[in-house]
Amino acid sequence: MIIAVCHPSLEVHMDIVALIGRVLFVLVFLMSGFNHLTNLAAMSGYAESKNFPAPRAAVAVSGIWIIVAALLVLIGVWGDLGALMLFVFLVATAFGFHAFWSESDPGTQQNEMNHFLKDIALAGASLVLFAVFSQVGIGLTATGPLFG
């Protein structure tokens, strides 16, 4: 790390900054995952309204999926795998649930576009995290990368 060469004490600080960033990043996924599991009926109704197959099972599995992915990123145990899991979830959610281009009501279309863009932006951030985790020694992690 170039910063560490110039200022060795900054390396520790950057590890802490990376950990704080991971905590902030995964909060939305942990909360959403627990919401999937604790509000299964309501979430399943939404999935059913979007014609998603086996909505109850899909909501339960996706809730567990994003909790596991978020914990992998947070703890830094195969964080690269966790980041890729979040990427898959976000792209599937963006295209499967927020197809704004198929909405005719302007308000609904705008709302779905906002959710679509949010999911795509978070998917991009997940790919950046994947790249960061693939570099051993960046941030405070429990293991090295799975795909490195």
Image (cartoon, helix red, strand yellow):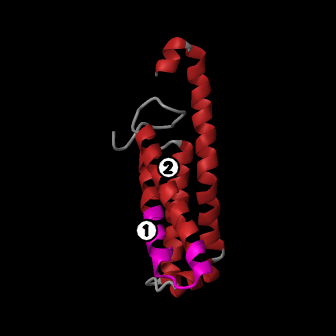
The mark that comes first in sequence, 2 or 1, is 1
Residue 129 left/right relative to 46: left
Q: Say whether residue 94 is magenta.
A: yes
Q: Residue at x 51, y 67 (%)?
A: 116
**Name of the residue lying farthest toward the left:** 148
Amino acid residing under circle 1 = Ala
Q: Secondary structure at mark 2?
A: helix
Q: In the image, residue 62 lies at what x, y percent? A: 50, 69
Q: Is residue 94 shown above or below 29? A: below
Amino acid residing under circle 2 = Ala
Q: Is residue 57 visible?
A: yes
Which residues, given as a range, are shown in magenta? 89-111
Q: Is residue 78 visible?
A: no
Name the residue carrying label 2: 125
Q: Residue at x 55, y 51 (%)?
A: 71
Q: In the image, residue 129 lies at what x, y percent? A: 47, 44
Q: Is residue 7 shown above or below 25? A: above
Residue 128 left/right relative to 27: left
Name the residue carrying label 1: 92
Q: Residue at x 62, y 79 (%)?
A: 107
Magenta region's main secondary structure?
Answer: helix
Q: Quadrant of residue 7?
A: top right
Q: How many marks?
A: 2
Disc 2 from disc 1: Cα separation? 15 Å
Q: Residues within 10 Å of mark 1 (few under 14, many from 20)?
A: some
The foreground one among 92 and 73 is: 92
Q: Secondary structure at mark 1?
A: helix
The foreground one among 69 and 129 is: 129
Q: Residue at x 55, y 77 (%)?
A: 109
Q: Quadrant of residue 11?
A: top right
